[in-house]
């Protein structure tokens, strides 16, 4: 065999080995996903003979949902009949039946309910409930940096109180991913279920990922630098489009930061889109300054990042895989949309319409070549851009949606499209929501959200 032939054979062997490795991971993850689905179905089903303990969650980015799953899993494993449900799936009839409930509720907007509890909360406000038979425990998730700390959890607590329900223990307020609060919750669970020994809580595990590439996507921008990062896992890892990465930064390890993943598992690397923010005193943001290396002792190429990936069911494809999708976002919100678009480009699914907003086309067209390429190749059937500062009057994505109201109705009503929104809540997502309601009507937008055809990853 010549040297070249030897090389070719060695390369072929390597490719085959890599393909086998990928297939192995894929099969393992598929089995794991199937098992998780079976477990979730079992937990969602009321067991015969006993009124199950209700574990209800209100969650936007999946944190409360993850704790609810773990809570239900532990109680289920300890022999408690459990029913697990998002608050929106809990109605008056179920509450009337339920004698014991545990609620895990995060807060969004300005003290508001997350999207998957909005309909439930509307129903709560509409009529007085009588729940003297109900005893409940409540874990409220929030962040003290917001004015209305744990606002929704507190409001839910007050509403349950008002309805005559009895707290089993004082509400636990959890600031960020505070370990003490989780410990207190675990303690209450063991008391509550009269268990001396609860099975182990599966705490999230962080691993050391390696930064292998970084480049600024908006040189010359009037805004803060936006960097594209590529991180390699210590061992092959899979995730779904829409999922999130949680990062512990050296200067503030107690408060992990969340980023939408901008790539797909097939890329082999997690891509992140990070804006290097500046604090009010002019110093670089603790996490973004480190990741973008705009500060002293920033993260170098080859450096380690403590990271874990988190499922974000609210922003996954779920039932929308075969549907046309309108993706809407601004700034670094493009990250969560790009993971979906890369997946749809790879799978050949569509049609896809992207509405993207930034400041100036000349400097801020993030992933511009890729997006224009997708438009040329048909991955994107339509691309609308709103560069707010390219003309005297400001234009944003919500304005583009208002202009395209007829097309939007056609995509949603005739073609059955789903809507995915990613980016800032203030300004963008609120404005987009208003534009959608103006174009499609309140009732239709609410129904789309309820049925999982309107999904948001907003921050
Ligand atoms: C856009 C946005 C708005 C938020 N608003 C509040 C708030 O008003 N009060 C609060 O305590 N926490 C607020 N938070 C923090 C979340 O409640 C907290 O991160 C929580 O852990 C998220 O849980 P989840 O992943 O289950 O949605 C907000 C977070 C985001 C991203």
Image: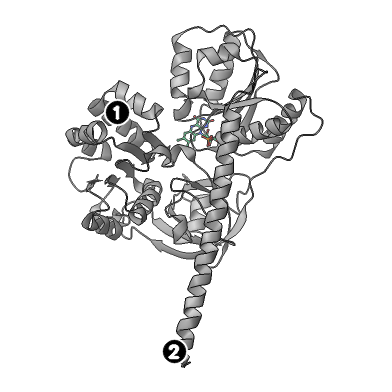
Residue at 53% over, 65% down: 20
Look at the picture and state if 15 lies above or below 427.
Answer: below
Look at the picture and state if 27 lies above or below 448.
Answer: below
Q: How is the image coloured?
A: one colour
Q: Residue furthest bottom?
A: 2
Question: Quick check: 224 left or right of 68?
Answer: left
Number of marks? 2
Question: In front: 351, or 365?
Answer: 351
**Residue beneath label 1, please?**
434
Q: Secondary structure at mark 1?
A: helix
State the CA–CA distance, disc 2 to disc 1.
63 Å
Tag nearer the camera, 2 or 1: 2
Residue 360 in view, yes or no = yes
Question: Quick check: 147 left or right of 68?
Answer: left
Q: Dividing the picture into quarters, in which one does residue 434 lie?
A: top left
Question: Quick check: 158 left or right of 168?
Answer: left
**Callout 2 environment at 10 Å: few (<14), some (14 to 19), or many (20+)?**
few
Q: Dividing the picture into quarters, in which one does residue 96 lie?
A: top right
Quadrant housing the C terminus: top left
Residue at 59% over, 61% down: 235
**Residue beneath label 2, please?**
4
Residue 142 in view, yes or no = no
- Find residue 257 and report its horizontal and vertical position in percent: 53, 46
Q: Secondary structure at mark 2?
A: helix
- Find residue 80 and report its horizontal and vertical position in percent: 71, 26
Look at the picture and state if 243 lies above or below 127.
Answer: below
- Find residue 451 and report its horizontal and vertical position in percent: 39, 29
């Amino acid at each position: 065999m010549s040297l070249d032939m030897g090389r070719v054979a060695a390369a072929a062997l390597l490719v085959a080995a890599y393909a086998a490795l990928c297939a192995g991971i894929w099969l393992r993850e598929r089995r794991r996903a199937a098992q998780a689905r079976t477990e979730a179905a079992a937990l969602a089903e009321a067991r015969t003979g006993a009124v199950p303990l209700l574990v209800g969650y209100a969650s936007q980015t999946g944190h409360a949902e993850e704790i609810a799953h773990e809570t239900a899993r532990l109680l289920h494993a300890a022999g408690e009949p459990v029913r697990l449900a998002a608050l929106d799936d809990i109605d008056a009839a179920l509450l009337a039946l339920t004698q014991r409930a545990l609620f895990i509720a995060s807060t969004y907007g300005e003290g508001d309910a997350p999207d998957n509890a909005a309909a439930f909360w509307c129903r709560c406000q509409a009529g007085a409930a009588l729940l003297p038979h109900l005893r409940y425990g409540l874990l409220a998730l929030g962040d003290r940096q917001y004015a209305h700390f744990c606002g929704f959890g507190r409001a839910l607590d007050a509403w349950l109180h008002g309805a005559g329900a009895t707290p089993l223990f004082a509400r636990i307020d959890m600031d960020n991913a505070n370990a003490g609060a989780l410990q207190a919750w675990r303690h209450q669970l063991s008391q509550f279920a009269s268990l001396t020994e609860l099975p182990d809580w599966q705490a999230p595990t962080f691993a050391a990922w390696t930064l292998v590439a970084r480049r600024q996507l908006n040189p010359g921008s009037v805004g803060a630098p936006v960097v594209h990062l590529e991180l390699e896992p210590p061992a092959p890892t899979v995730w779904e489009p829409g999922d999130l990465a949680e990062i512990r930064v050296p200067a503030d390890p107690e408060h992990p930061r969340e980023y939408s993943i901008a790539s797909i598992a097939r890329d082999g690397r997690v891509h992140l889109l990070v804006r290097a923010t500046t604090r009010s005193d002019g110093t670089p943001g603790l996490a973004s300054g480190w990741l973008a290396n705009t500060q002293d002792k920033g993260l170098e190429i080859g450096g380690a990042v403590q990271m874990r990936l988190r499922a974000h069911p609210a922003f996954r494809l779920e039932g929308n895989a075969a549907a046309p999708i309108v993706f809407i976002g601004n700034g670094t919100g493009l990250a969560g949309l790009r993971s979906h678009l890369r997946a749809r480009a790879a799978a050949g699914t569509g049609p896809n319409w992207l509405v993207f907003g930034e400041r100036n086309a000349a400097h801020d067209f993030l992933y511009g070549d890729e997006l224009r390429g997708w438009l040329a190749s048909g991955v994107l059937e339509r691309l609308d851009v709103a560069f707010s500062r390219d003309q005297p009057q400001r234009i944003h994505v919500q304005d583009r949606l208002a202009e395209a109201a007829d097309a939007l109705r056609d995509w949603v009503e005739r073609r059955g499209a789903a809507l995915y929104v990613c980016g800032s809540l203030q300004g963008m997502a609120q404005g987009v929501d208003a534009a959608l309601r103006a174009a499609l009507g309140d009732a239709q937008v609410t129904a789309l959200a309820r049925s999982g055809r309107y999904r948001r990853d907003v921050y």
